[in-house]
Image (tube, rainbow, N blue to C red):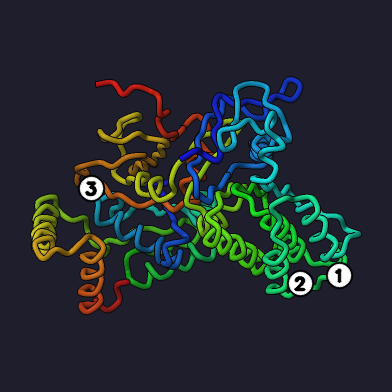
């Protein structure tokens, strides 16, 4: 199946600063992918490149096999993008906003767009500026979904919402994914939001992609090993050490892979998703990326 | 430098102070801590794992209540002479072999890992030892 998002050597430079560098990933179809990383890591720029709102400095990005810049019109109907802070027209009423969506989108689904907002008890005659943050986000999501996109891009969709509004937003999102099977890429720096809804994780840090993969696989493949103090650099075979910490008597190893036989006195603990993300972010040189598909495996 | 460090998992469902206590006990069992050793200070733990100092205090207080550690005001918290000693290597191996036998038996009954773990947790609960979490 054709990937909703594929990037090869993708880079974006503003003046002398690289906002994104040498980014190669392929997000498989039907995923809710989470894009995490510190502020300024390059998340928004990556989303803007995918949405065709920025053009790459190096490499390329394709959306359903096409360049978002040169096939903007063809992709416009298939991709929905909700930018940070859910920009809507504050002077429009909710009904105006829906009408706006209807007139500008050829595949617009007025009935389900209305139904979704009605279910959330959002008053259609209210101006956008008088809605709560949670309601405004729901209207933005409603507009994005009303397009009936095949790929939905969300930039920090819940960053400013309270916990209840966050949960409701995510419920709206997961319900639509269950119904229409769309692919989603959403950025957040709150791992808890990602953990609940995403099944694919991309970690971006300092403009580079550090980790990309299925969350279940990542979780099953990363562990914390605790044991007596070892010499610096000593590591059990079969694993790749991402990070090491020593005390006078104890060594903690954050590893990828699994040790077949743990030595006496060693313990293996699972890593939470948050711990996994923090571990990678604290070691920017470490990476866990799927092997490029065309690369030959040495015999 | 602290002798040991703690690793907390907020999503495990186990209270943070209980996780701290468990890790002190396991460090004793595995010989990383011995009687007379000083536990990391409350400030060290709070700085290392970003946990409320009161949570560390509570864990240390409960360990003290169990007689494993003693707090000496102004000096720190120390492992007592009465704390359980580390398990001898041969006894550790023997115990491990016993568990492995049980697991093989379970496998023969086609129990998967999570069912075995649930069974173990159940038996552990039925044989709950007073005063030990």
Q: In the rendered structure, which disc, 1 or 3, sits on the residue that comes first in sequence? A: 1
Q: Is residue A99 left or right of residue A27?
A: right
In percent of width and height, residue A41 lies at 64, 36
User: Would you name the residue on which mark 1 appears?
Assistant: A126
User: Would you name the residue on which mark 2 appears?
Assistant: A122
Residue A50 found in image quarter: top right
Cβ–Cβ below 8 Å for labels 2 and 3? no
Q: Residue at x 69, y 70 (%)?
A: A115
User: Considering the numbered disc 3 on the image, is that residue within a helix, a strand or a loop?
Assistant: loop
Q: In the rendered structure, which disc, 2 or 3, sits on the residue that comes first in sequence? A: 2
Residue A8 found in image quarter: top right
User: In the depicted view, which residue is nearer to us: B103 or A132?
Assistant: A132
Of circles 1 and 3, the one toward us is 1
Q: Is residue A48 visible?
A: yes
- Please, which chain is the residue tagged with disc 3 on? A
In percent of width and height, residue B48 lies at 50, 49
Label 1 and label 3: CA atoms lie apart by 64 Å
């Amino acid at each position: 199946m054709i990937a909703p998002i594929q990037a090869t050597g993708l880079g974006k430079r503003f003046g002398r600063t690289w906002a994104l560098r040498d980014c190669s990933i392929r997000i498989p179809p039907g995923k809710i992918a989470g894009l995490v990383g510190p502020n300024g890591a390059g998340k928004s720029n990556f989303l803007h490149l995918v949405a065709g709102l920025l053009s790459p400095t190096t490499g390329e990005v394709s959306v359903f096999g096409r360049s978002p810049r040169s096939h903007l019109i063809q992709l416009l109907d298939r991709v929905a993008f909700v930018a940070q802070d859910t920009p809507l027209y504050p002077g429009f009423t909710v009904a105006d906003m829906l009408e706006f969506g209807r007139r500008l989108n050829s595949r617009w689904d007025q009935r389900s767009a209305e139904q979704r907002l009605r279910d959330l008890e959002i008053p259609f005659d209210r101006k956008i500026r008088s809605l709560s943050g949670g309601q405004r986000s729901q209207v933005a999501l409603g507009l994005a979904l009303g397009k009936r996109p095949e790929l939905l891009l969300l930039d920090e969709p819940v960053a400013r919402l309270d916990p209840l509004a966050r949960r409701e937003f995510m419920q709206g999102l997961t319900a639509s994914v269950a119904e229409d099977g769309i692919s989603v890429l959403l950025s957040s720096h709150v791992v808890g939001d990602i953990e609940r809804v995403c099944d694919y994780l991309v970690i971006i840090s300092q403009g580079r992609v550090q980790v990309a993969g299925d969350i279940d696989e990542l979780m099953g493949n990363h562990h914390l090993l605790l044991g007596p103090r070892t010499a610096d650099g000593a590591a059990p075979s079969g694993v790749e050490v991402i990070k090491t910490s020593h005390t006078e008597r104890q060594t903690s190893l954050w590893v990828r892979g699994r040790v077949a036989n743990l030595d006496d006195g060693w313990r293996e603990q699972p890593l939470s998703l948050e711990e996994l993300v923090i571990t990678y972010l604290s070691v920017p040189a470490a990476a866990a990326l799927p092997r490029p598909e065309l690369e030959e495996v040495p015999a | 430098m602290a002798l040991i460090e703690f690793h907390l998992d907020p999503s495990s469902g186990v209270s943070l102070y209980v996780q701290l206590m468990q890790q002190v006990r396991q460090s004793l069992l595995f010989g990383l801590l011995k009687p007379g050793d000083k536990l990391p200070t409350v400030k060290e733990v709070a700085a290392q794992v970003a946990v409320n100092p009161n949570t560390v205090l509570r864990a240390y207080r409960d360990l003290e209540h169990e007689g494993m550690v003693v707090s000496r005001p102004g000096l720190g918290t120390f492992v007592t002479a009465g704390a359980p000693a580390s398990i001898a290597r041969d006894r550790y191996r023997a115990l491990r072999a016993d568990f492995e036998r049980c697991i093989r038996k379970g496998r023969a009954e086609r129990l998967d890992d999570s069912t075995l773990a649930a069974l173990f947790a159940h038996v552990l609960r039925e044989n709950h030892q007073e005063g030990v979490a």
